[in-house]
Image: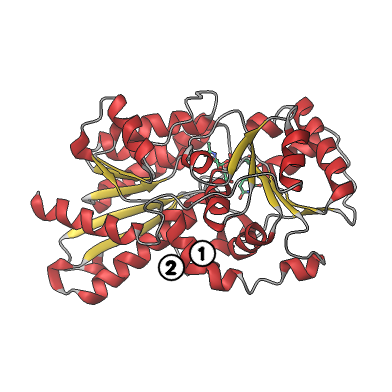
Amino acid sequence: MNSIFKPNVPSKMKLILVAGARPNFMKIAPLIRAIQVHNEQTGGAQKMGHILVHTGQHYDIQMSDIFFAELGIPAPDINLEVGSGSHAEQTARVMMAFEPVCIREKPDWVVVVGDVNSTMACTLVASKLGVKVAHVEAGLRSFDRTMPEEINRIVTDSLAELLLTPSADADENLKREGIPASKIRLVGNIMIDTLVANLNQARRSCLADTLDIKPKTFVYVTLHRPSNVDDVKSLILIMSQLESLAHRIPVVFPVHPRTRNMMKLAGLSIQNGANLKLLDPIGYHDSLSLTEKAKFVLTDSGGLQEESTYLGTPCLTLRPNTERPVTVIVGTNKLTRPDSLADDIEEVMQNRRAPGRIPPYWDGHTAERIVKILRQLTADS
Ligand code: UD1
């Protein structure tokens, strides 16, 4: 089968961009846009050829298609359609499906983002084929190897040729692991590029009106980490705390499919009442709008820790650690546990939390910096 890079000839540089799961889409969108802008401004061999591979790790409309539509991401050139499975099954399926694509397309770089199974699987494939990998959002560490994402981060970063980091702590983590400084570039937080580009549209979201909730009088909750939701005891405890919280303030909780499945398995029949609003997963604009309008966010998501910091909304992260410490040190984030949640909620409800600041390099220009670096490195090689 012929390469599908043809539309981009005579470009000198060929990139495969990989996205697989919901949080990847917000990270790949600004990169595609920055490449398009670069290509509009330059001609001939200066152009960057790129194809988008969707691994199909996430596949529901609400987990995938809606993000392509809202963020203006072009349809993937290739969808590997790997679907769900155990970690080994999913990783292996991505690897088996991605290898022939890499062999056929012969890219100069495979660009992976974030820390999901697809990120690690495509990195392994490309590295073994001698194709250089650029990792966007490199260097984040929770130092908790019970998190599948931590394993994905360590493997990806140890193999990648170019480590594009969001914050200075990430650079330090990588150097401590023996990665040469020449491979590390502090480019900033690419999620914030997407936030900045979409904030006006997010502000037009009607979701709060539809739910009949007013700004700063509700809590926005998202929970999907296996450590919180795969353990029945922990899930029951968390859900009972959300029910109590909903007696004081409306709680809006779009439920991730993993969490919904676990609720069913645990036999939890939560009353979806006036104050506890359990929704299907929501799109990017609605989520950003709720993050900005909420009194506080209660989450175990990585992206929401960052988005709430940028928007100045207090965030309680229901995890013992975070790979994004800058959101705690500089931003509005605080780690919490099921047994300290009630006290931490009280603190936010009484406005006793100090305001945060926006961390350095969270300025909406990360993708442009990445494009520049990729161009320089390819010109030098
Ligand atoms: C994955 C990522 C996690 C990320 C999260 C965001 C890994 C190891 N985990 O976790 O880092 O924070 O995505 O959502 O890569 N399902 C559906 N529809 C879908 C996708 C999944 O119903 O479109 C259900 C399936 O039952 C599946 C379960 O959700 O088994 C979990 O999906 P999976 O991709 O394995 O992990 P996430 O929990 O989504």
Split into 4 quadrants, where in the image is the N terminus? bottom left
Q: Relative to 319, is 16 on the left or the right? A: left
Pointer 1: residues within 10 angstroms few (<14), some, or many (20+)? Answer: some
* Residue visible at 40% across and 59% down in the picture: 363
Image coordinates for residue 29, horizontal then vertical, percent: 43, 61
Q: Nearer the viewer, residue 221 or 25?
A: 221
Residue 75, image x and y in percent? 45, 66
Quarter of the rendering containing residue 98: top left
Q: Does the residue labelled 1 lie within 8 Å of ligand 1?
A: no
Q: Is ligand 1 closer than 8 angstroms to the Cβ of mark 2?
A: no
Instruction: Say whether residue 24 is visible.
Output: yes
Distance from Cα at disc 1 to Cα at disc 2: 7 Å
Foreground pick, 370 / 40? 370
The image quarter containing residue 338 is top right
Q: Earlier in the sequence, mark 1 or mark 2?
A: 1
Residue denoted by label 1: 68
Q: In this view, does 240 lie to the left or right of 93?
A: right
Q: Measuring from the top left, give residue 222's x and y in whole percent.
A: 68, 46
Disc 2 marks a residue whose amino acid type is Pro
Q: Which amino acid does label 1 sit on?
A: Phe
Pointer 2 residue:
74
Instruction: Name which residue lies at 46% across and 41% down.
Output: 326
> Disc number at residue 321?
none
Kindly identify the residue that appears in the image at 60 percent across and 46 percent down: 354
Q: Name above or below for residue 293 compared with residue 117.
A: below
Q: Is residue 2 visible?
A: no
In the rendered image, which quarter is residue 84 located in?
Answer: top right
